[in-house]
Image (spheres, rainbow, N blue to C red):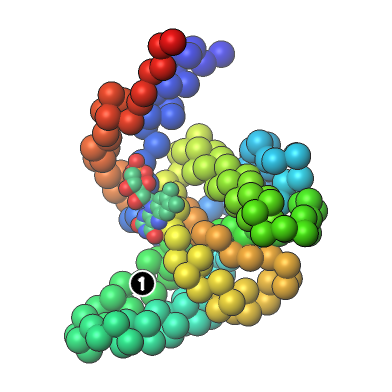
Amino acid sequence: MPTKEDLHRFLRTRRSVRRFKPDPIPASVIEEILTTATFAPSAHNRQPWRFCVVSDLPAKTHLAEAMVSKYQHELENDKYTSDEILHLVARSKDRILSAPVVIILSVDMSDMDTYPDKHRKKAEYIMATQSTANAGMHILLAAHAEGLGAVWVCSPLFAQETVQSALDLPKTWEPQAMYFLGYPAKIPEVRERKSLNDVLISMEM
Ligand SMILES: Cc1cc2nc3c(=O)[nH]c(=O)nc-3n(C[C@H](O)[C@H](O)[C@H](O)COP(=O)(O)O)c2cc1C
């Protein structure tokens, strides 16, 4: 049985890993990780998370090309130079192709409560995306438990329709993030944390 010190060490040693060995991840390991993700807490226990696993090269290439094409248009509109665009687009595509497994995480509002007013609608939507993010955190931690490296990538949030149509996801699935998973080629150093005192107010009445 791990001690509480072991568990704190486990939580504190998770890093965002961005370089992977090409070794494939067994399907059973991905299933185990996603099953653990479904144990995340969710508002009203409605479990609004949805997962799409992309691991074969043609599917990864199709996704990468759709995403970088949109990214390229945005960079052109933002007036980046053509050299910068070539570099950023190639890097973005390479990151998707070199990840042995890509998991797209979506939120589905179908089972959430509905309200007639904007304020409560917004709160309910935030609760659903917070719940979905919890499943994302569980993916990172379960990958860590399996000795895998993983990183959370936010680009699907900026290209929701592109990702949805490239992967032919159900219309109610709204992409929120993607996760690159693989056996780590390099585990980065721990990134600096704000000290607890900088982010904490202790109330004493
Ligand atoms: C909501 C969210 C979005 C992120 N988006 C990206 C991303 O697009 N690309 C990336 O390389 N890392 C991304 N990260 C990873 C963060 O950069 C990383 O968690 C942070 O630098 C701390 O490093 P650590 O995870 O190794 O502790 C994201 C993390 C979160 C929680």
**Quadrant assignment, res 116:** bottom right
| Residue 176 in sight in this render | yes
Which residue shows up at 28% across the image and 76% down it?
Answer: 88
Percent from the top left, x then y, of residue 190? Answer: 27, 37
Which residue shows up at 22% across the image and 89% down it?
Answer: 82
Front residue of 143/162: it is: 162
Element under label 1? helix
| Mark 1 nearby-residue class (10 Å; few <14, some 14–19, many ≥20) | some
Q: Amino acid at mark 1?
A: Ser
| Residue 28 in sight in this render | no
Disc 1 within 8 angstroms of ligand 1 (CB): no
Q: Which residue is mark 1?
A: 92
Which residue shows up at 51% across the image and 60% down it?
Answer: 178
Look at the picture and state if 119 lies above or below 203: below
Percent from the top left, x then y, of residue 163? Answer: 57, 74
Which residue shows up at 41% across the image and 11% down it?
Answer: 204
**Quadrant assignment, res 153:** bottom left
The quarter of the rendered structure image containing the N terminus is: top right
Look at the picture and state if 105 lies above or below 96: above
